[in-house]
Amino acid sequence: FHFFFVEQNSNELLKQVESLRLDLNESANKIKQEQAVLKGKTDREVADLMITIEDQDRQLNDLQKQLRKQAKQVSDISLELQASQRQYQDVNEQLGQSQKRCLNLHHELEEMKNNLEKVGRHYSKNSN
């Protein structure tokens, strides 16, 4: 009887161990499946992020090229502005000189008119 009881206990324990082993294998398989799913998801997310980074890097490079191009345009425009300002100053100086010359010529003309009138009056007096 004792032997039968031990054998029965032993069989029950073996069944429990086998059940636990099956549960453990099932749990391990589930974990491996979940791990594979998560790894796949993570790999896709990493790939998507890499694509996003590459796109943003290209956009950044394009923006930097545009910025360099616009900086050159600003520099060129600044040089043109400086040249225009120098030309304006030159023209303004020439205008000032021309105005002075015009005023001097006007004074000379007035003086010549006065002299001509004097000469005309002088001849008028002498002819009478």
Image (spheres, helix red, strand yellow):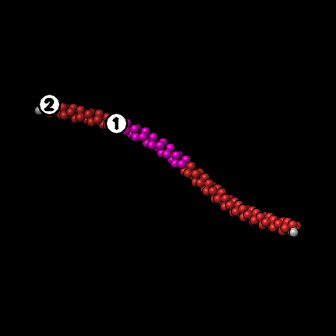
From the image, tell me which residue sits under label 1.
96
Residue 78, given in percent of the width and then of the height, sits at: 47, 43
Q: Is residue 3 left or right of residue 86?
A: right
Does residue 5 show up?
yes
Quadrant for the N terminus in the image? bottom right
Write the residue at 54% across / 48% down: 67
Indicate whether residue 118 is drawn in magenta.
no
Q: Nearer the viewer, mark 1 or mark 2?
A: 1
The answer to which image quadrant residue 101 occupies is: top left
Write the residue at 24% across / 32% down: 111
From the image, tell me which residue sits under label 2.
126
The answer to which image quadrant residue 21 occupies is: bottom right
Q: Secondary structure at mark 1?
A: helix
The answer to which image quadrant residue 98 occupies is: top left
Q: Is residue 71 left or right of residue 121?
A: right
Residue 122, given in percent of the width and then of the height, sits at: 16, 31
Which secondary structure is most common in the magenta stretch? helix
What's the amino acid at mark 2? Asn
Residue 53, given in percent of the width and then of the height, sits at: 62, 54
